[in-house]
Image (spheres, helix red, strand yellow):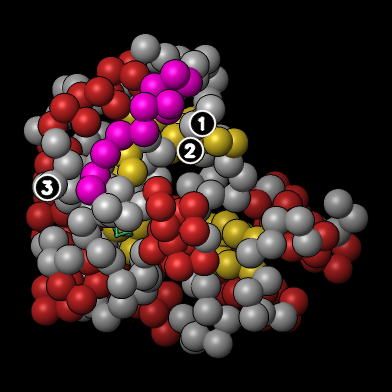
C-alpha cells in the first residue's frame, strides 16, 4: 500500500500522500526535506537516490473517494528529466478515482501547463517561489526562473504559491509576480523577527489571501509560539500551526487551538480547555 494517511502536512486539507515517483529529484533544492530524510533514514536514501523510476506497487492502490491526495510530495513529477510516460501513467491512475481531490506541486510549473487539460478533474496546483532575485535561484532550487513559475500559475484557476523559505526578495516586484494567487508563507524560526516583513507584505497583499505556517516544538518555547500566532492574527494573517512532534501533548493541543479558527478567535490560550 503506497497511499499514506497524512496529518499536519503543510497543506492543511491533505488527507493522504501518494509517492509513486522514486529516484533522485533533479532539482536538488538546498532546503529539500526529502534530502534531509535521506540523510537520516536508509530506506529513504534507497527510495530517493539513483535514476528516476516508478514504484510499481503504488499502482495497485485503490484510492476510493472522499480523500485529498498530495501526489509525489517527495519528488517533482514535472522536472524536465521525468519521462512523459511517468506523468501520464500517474494521471491515469488518479483519474480512475475521480471522487478525490489531488494536489500536484512543482518547481517547474511551466511544464504543468502542457498538461492543463489532462489533470484529474479536482486538482490544486502548487509551486514554491523563494525569491524574485534570479541570482539566488540557482542556489535555492536549481535555477528554475521565478518569473516562469509565476506565469505558469496563471494558467490554473485553483493554484497556490508558497513563499518558502522566506528568502531575500524585492517585495513590490515580487507581488507583481504572484498577486493573483493564494499565497502561503512560513514563520518557522522563532528567533527570526518577521514583523518588518509582515508589515511590508500586508501593504501589497490582502491578508485574506495569505496563510502563514508556524512550526512549533522545534527549538521554540510556548511564549515564542504564542507570540508568532498572535502577531499574525494582529495583522489579519491566518496562522496554521505545524507541530514538530505530533505525539507531544502540548504541541497537539496548541495546534488544535490555533487551527480551529472559530476557537482561536474566541478563546485565549490560557482559557483553552481542549
Ligand atoms: S523540487 Fe521538491 S523534492 Fe525536488 S529537490 Fe526541490 S524541494 Fe526537494
Marks 1 and 3 sit apart, C-alpha to C-alpha, by 25 Å
Q: Which numbered disc flags the more N-terminal residue, 1 or 3? A: 1
Label pair 2/1, CB-CB below 8 angstroms: yes
Label 1: which residue?
Answer: 3
Q: Which numbered disc flags the more N-terminal residue, 3 or 2? A: 2
Q: Quadrant of ligand 1?
A: bottom left
Tally of numbered tags? 3
Label 3: which residue?
Answer: 80
Task: Name the residue at 36% across, 27% down.
Answer: 56
Percent from the top left, x then y, of residue 223?
73, 81
Task: Name the residue at 69% across, 62% down.
Answer: 245
* Residues shaded magenta: 51-61
Percent from the top left, x then y, of residue 96?
37, 12
Residue 58 badge: none
Task: Name the residue at 49% across, 32% down.
Answer: 2
Q: Is residue 11 left or right of residue 250?
A: left
Marks 2 and 1 sit apart, C-alpha to C-alpha, by 6 Å
Q: Which numbered disc flags the more N-terminal residue, 2 or 1? A: 1
Percent from the top left, x then y, of residue 186?
46, 67
Q: Is residue 45 above or below residue 230?
A: above
Amino acid at each position: 500500500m503506497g497511499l499514506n494517511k497524512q496529518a499536519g502536512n503543510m497543506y492543511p486539507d491533505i488527507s493522504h500522500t501518494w509517492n509513486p515517483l522514486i529516484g533522485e529529484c533533479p532539482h536538488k533544492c538546498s532546503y529539500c526535506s526529502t534530502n534531509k530524510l535521506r540523510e537520516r533514514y536508509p530506506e529513504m536514501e534507497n527510495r530517493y537516490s539513483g535514476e528516476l523510476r516508478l514504484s510499481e506497487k503504488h499502482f495497485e492502490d485503490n484510492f476510493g473517494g472522499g480523500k485529498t491526495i498530495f501526489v509525489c510530495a517527495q519528488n517533482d513529477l514535472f522536472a524536465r528529466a521525468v519521462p512523459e510516460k511517468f506523468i501520464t501513467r500517474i494521471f491515469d491512475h488518479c483519474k480512475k478515482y475521480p471522487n478525490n481531490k489531488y494536489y500536484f506541486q512543482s518547481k517547474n510549473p511551466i511544464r504543468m501547463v502542457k498538461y492543463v487539460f489532462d489533470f484529474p478533474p479536482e486538482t490544486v496546483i502548487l509551486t514554491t517561489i523563494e525569491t524574485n532575485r534570479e541570482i539566488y535561484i540557482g542556489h535555492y532550487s536549481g535555477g528554475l526562473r521565478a518569473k516562469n513559475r509565476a506565469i505558469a500559475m496563471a494558467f490554473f484557476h485553483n493554484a497556490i504559491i508558497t513563499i518558502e523559505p522566506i528568502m531575500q526578495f524585492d517585495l513590490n516586484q515580487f507581488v507583481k509576480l504572484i498577486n493573483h494567487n493564494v499565497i502561503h508563507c512560513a514563520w518557522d524560526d522563532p528567533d527570526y523577527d518577521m514583523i518588518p516583513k509582515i508589515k511590508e507584505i500586508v501593504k501589497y497583499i490582502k491578508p485574506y489571501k495569505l496563510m502563514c505556517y508556524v512550526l512549533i516544538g522545534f527549538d521554540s518555547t510556548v511564549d515564542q509560539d504564542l507570540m508568532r500566532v498572535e502577531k499574525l492574527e494582529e495583522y489579519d494573517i491566518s496562522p496554521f500551526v505545524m507541530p514538530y512532534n505530533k505525539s507531544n501533548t502540548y504541541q497537539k493541543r496548541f495546534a488544535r487551538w490555533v487551527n480551529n479558527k472559530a476557537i482561536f478567535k474566541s478563546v485565549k490560550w490560557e482559557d483553552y480547555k481542549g
